[in-house]
Image (tube, rainbow, N blue to C red):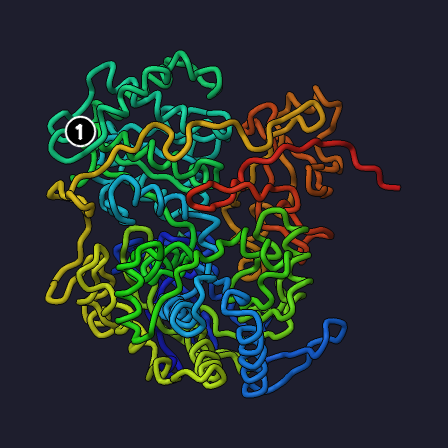
């Protein structure tokens, strides 16, 4: 799709968070001149937050990758080259490594910032052409525990509710999400809901007293890592006080009796001390949930980025299954996605643990079906490497070449020193990116310039399963190209070298890629075989399932009480599935007395490669600081504003010290956005641990033990 006329307005989508706000790009003479919210978009109805409303200020060439760049040795600088040389070199290196060491010696690490069409081509390249499951996404860092939580309870990775349910709920439980900052337009809808319904009660569970927690009428300021205890204790109360929907449990679920037997030890009195909250507040939270006419829960990284994130998700979903708060207006367990197209990545199967349309790579039947649909002999059986393990494998020399797209692992992955060592050790690093000034670009042997926001055409799916068109307003700068087109071009060249047909990557345009993607969803839980770019143009954003012949989208799943499991019943996993509550992987000690958590600021996005270029976004928080409770200043003999060394088991960084009453005593908080490109060191992830949830492989990014000591400036 070509950019629109010389002067005009183009409907598109915000490229930051999973809210998925529609916007109108104003442009003239090949430049983006303004942006405003799309009043007709059902996610935001014209609203934008500070980040979305300043997107036009990110347009331009500052920091952009403009031309392919290649270096011939690690010591040499990258120099400009042409596209043919760049892609032939990449295809040649990958083909050599695959021939010599096998397909699992290469890997792809991609991004929830990519469009669905980009994601799809990458996934087909890895699984069908190369023959490896070594493809993972930075979405692993934010919502893979939610995917596994849904699958292990509801039978499929489907967010059952919609934003419109906010206005229909009479109780809202927000867990591990500072929605006011991370999903600001969703939060505006929550404020609207409370204005319209003064009886709406809001409980927030968060170790920090955030702006979202301030809004709640009950804040459970739990100790980090105790979510599982809390939700099991709430279920204990629901059982004890008979606030259950027994008909729903009997007719639509399995496993409740076994679970109930194990709940005995999770009384509020038993867990309150570990959770760091009053037993009375746990009881009150459970009663609000159980007595509500319609209860909606929303959660994000606080629940997911845990050593038992899947169990946390399952425990929260159990509350809905026990009370029947699911499949009805205003009710349901609603996992918020962090990135603009994390959901699209789940649809196309661009995580090591998923095949297209939510198929399972562990299933021989699913692999055979995908092989047939893609017209290849087989889909590999060997499990793919998830993000943390993928970079471990590079460090160990098992993966020799990595193709990274639209993400910045040298800033965002835990235990950064190890990740940077891995990138240093890799034989060949391809980086396909809109920006050349990221931390990861430093390690790239080949830089492929990609189109960015305002320059691309395709689709994204937001948190509520709503598929929206992304449209280009201007041409990309320099020689940048759309991600899907670069990847398909690379795939054709690689196919030739591997002696395989290249025709399966001959897509006429992004609409053709989308058409192939949706054709694979036919009959699946996420069936969107009735969608096409043309349908989206005609009808606007639509929610899946949208099977062939559908005329409207689906705002709510499981309304008939039938779940996509073998017997149609949802499952109560056993308490603590797949593990019982476990202490933090890195407990505090006298030497490391603070629990460090990291999180988002209101006005920055990820590693700031885009948002950091907008001067006015720096007004909210102009510098990185480590925040602690004022009582810890007194205890530790520290002063607000002084520079401190933050020391963990894997490294240390130096930051100014700040106080925040919202941070509990004994805890510390650092925003996640800064890295080596914006600080003199590599940011908070030097400190974070690579401990992962055993099922989802999602890193426990919110839990590390650190000490804080005065920095000496000599
Ligand atoms: Fe963009 Fe999210 Fe803000 Fe909406 S809420 S404008 S999608 S950053």
Q: Mark 1: few, some, or many residues within 10 Å (few <14, many ≥20)?
A: some
Helix, strand or loop at label 1? It is: loop
In the rendered view, would you say 471 is above or below 365? below
Q: In screen coordinates, is 102 left or right of 681?
A: left
- Any part of residue 646 in sight: yes
Q: Quadrant of residue 353?
A: bottom left
- Any part of residue 29 in sight: no
In the rendered view, would you say 516 is above or below 245? below
What is the count of numbered marks? 1
In the rendered view, would you say 59 is above or below 383? below
Q: Position of residue 479 (x, y in %)?
A: 53, 83
Q: Position of residue 458 (x, y in %)?
A: 35, 71
Residue at figure coordinates x 59%, y 61% from the top left = 398
Q: Position of residue 124 (x, y in %)?
A: 38, 70
In the rendered view, would you say 463 is above or below 658? below
Q: According to the image, label 1 marks what residue? A: 293
**Foreground of the two, 33 or 287:** 287
Q: Position of residue 206 (x, y in %)?
A: 45, 31
**Foreground of the two, 436 or 48:** 436
Q: Quadrant of residue 63?
A: bottom right
Q: In screen coordinates, is 118 left or right of 570?
A: right
Q: In screen coordinates, is 238 left or right of 400?
A: left
Disc 1 residue: CB within 8 Å of ligand 1: no
Q: In screen coordinates, is 687 left or right of 246?
A: right
What is the quadrant of the C terminus in the image? top right
What is the quadrant of the N terminus in the image? bottom left
Q: Which residue ends up furthest to the right in the rendered image?
A: 714
Residue at figure coordinates x 70%, y 79% from the top left = 72
Rendered-image quarter of ligand 1: bottom left
Residue at figure coordinates x 39%, y 14% from the top left = 279
């Amino acid at each position: 799709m070509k950019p629109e006329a010389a002067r005009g307005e183009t409907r598109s989508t915000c490229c930051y968070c999973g809210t998925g706000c529609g916007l109108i790009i104003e442009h003239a003479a090949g430049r983006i001149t303004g942006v405003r919210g799309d009043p007709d978009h059902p996610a935001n109805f014209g609203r934008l937050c500070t980040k979305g409303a300043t997107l036009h200020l990110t347009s331009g060439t500052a920091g952009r990758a403009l031309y392919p760049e290649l270096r011939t040795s690690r010591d040499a600088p990258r120099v400009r080259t042409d596209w043919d040389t760049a892609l032939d070199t990449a295809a040649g290196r990958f083909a050599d490594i695959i021939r010599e060491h096998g397909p699992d010696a290469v890997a792809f690490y991609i991004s929830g910032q990519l469009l669905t069409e980009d994601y799809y081509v990458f996934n087909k390249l890895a699984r069908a052409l190369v023959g490896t499951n070594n493809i993972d996404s930075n979405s692993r860092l934010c919502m893979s525990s939610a995917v596994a939580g849904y699958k292990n309870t509801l039978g499929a990775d489907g967010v059952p509710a919609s934003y419109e349910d906010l206005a229909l709920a009479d109780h809202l439980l927000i867990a591990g999400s500072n929605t006011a900052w991370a999903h600001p337009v969703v939060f505006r809808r929550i404020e609207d809901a409370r204005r319209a319904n003064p009886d709406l009660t809001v409980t927030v569970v968060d170790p920090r007293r955030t702006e979202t927690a301030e809004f709640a009428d009950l804040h459970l300021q739990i100790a980090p890592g105790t979510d599982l205890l809390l939700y099991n204790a709430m279920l204990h109360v629901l059982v004890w006080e008979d606030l259950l929907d027994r008909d729903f449990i009997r007719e639509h679920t399995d496993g409740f009796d076994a679970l109930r037997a194990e709940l005995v030890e999770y009384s509020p009195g038993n867990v309150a001390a570990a959770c760091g909250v009053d037993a009375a507040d746990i009881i009150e939270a459970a009663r609000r949930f159980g007595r509500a006419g319609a209860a909606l829960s929303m959660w994000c990284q606080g629940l997911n980025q845990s050593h038992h994130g899947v169990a946390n998700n399952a425990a929260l979903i159990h509350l809905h299954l026990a009370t029947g708060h699911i499949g009805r207006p205003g009710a349901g367990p609603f996992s918020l996605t962090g990135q603009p197209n994390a959901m699209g990545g789940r649809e196309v199967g661009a995580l090591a643990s998923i095949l297209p349309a939510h198929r399972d790579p562990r299933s021989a039947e699913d692999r055979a079906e995908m092989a047939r649909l893609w017209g290849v002999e087989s889909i590999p059986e060997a499990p793919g490497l998830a993000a943390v393990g993928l970079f471990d494998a590079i460090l160990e020399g098992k993966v020799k070449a990595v193709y990274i797209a639209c993400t910045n692992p040298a800033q965002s992955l835990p235990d950064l020193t190890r990740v940077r060592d891995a990138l240093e050790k890799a034989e060949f690093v391809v980086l396909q990116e809109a920006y050349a000034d990221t931390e990861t670009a430093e390690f790239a042997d080949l830089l492929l310039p990609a189109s960015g926001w305002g320059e691309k055409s395709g689709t994204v799916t937001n948190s509520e399963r709503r598929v929206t068109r992304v449209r280009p307003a201007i041409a990309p700068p320099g020689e940048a190209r759309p991600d899907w087109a670069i990847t398909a071009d690379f795939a054709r060249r690689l196919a030739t070298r591997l002696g395989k047909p290249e025709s399966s990557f001959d897509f006429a345009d992004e609409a053709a890629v989308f058409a192939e993607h949706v054709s694979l969803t036919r009959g699946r839980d996420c069936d969107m075989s009735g969608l096409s770019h043309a349908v989206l143009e005609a009808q606007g954003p639509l929610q899946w399932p949208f099977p062939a012949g559908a005329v409207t989208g689906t705002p709510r799943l499981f309304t008939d009480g039938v779940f996509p499991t073998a017997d149609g019943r949802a499952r109560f996993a056993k308490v603590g599935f797949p593990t019982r509550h476990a202490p933090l992987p890195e407990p505090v000690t006298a030497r490391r007395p603070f629990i460090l958590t990291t999180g988002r600021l209101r006005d920055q996005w990820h590693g700031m490669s885009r948002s950091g270029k907008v001067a006015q976004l720096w007004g909210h928080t102009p510098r990185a600081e480590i925040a602690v409770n004022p009582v810890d200043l007194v205890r530790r003999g520290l002063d607000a504003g002084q520079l401190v060394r933050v020391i963990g088991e894997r490294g240390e960084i130096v930051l100014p010290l700040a106080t925040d009453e919202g941070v509990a005593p004994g805890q510390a908080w650092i925003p996640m956005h800064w890295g080596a490109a914006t600080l003199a060191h590599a940011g908070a992830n030097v400190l974070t641990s690579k401990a992962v949830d055993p099922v989802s492989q999602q890193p426990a990014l919110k839990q590390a033990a650190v000490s804080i000591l005065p920095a000496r400036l000599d």
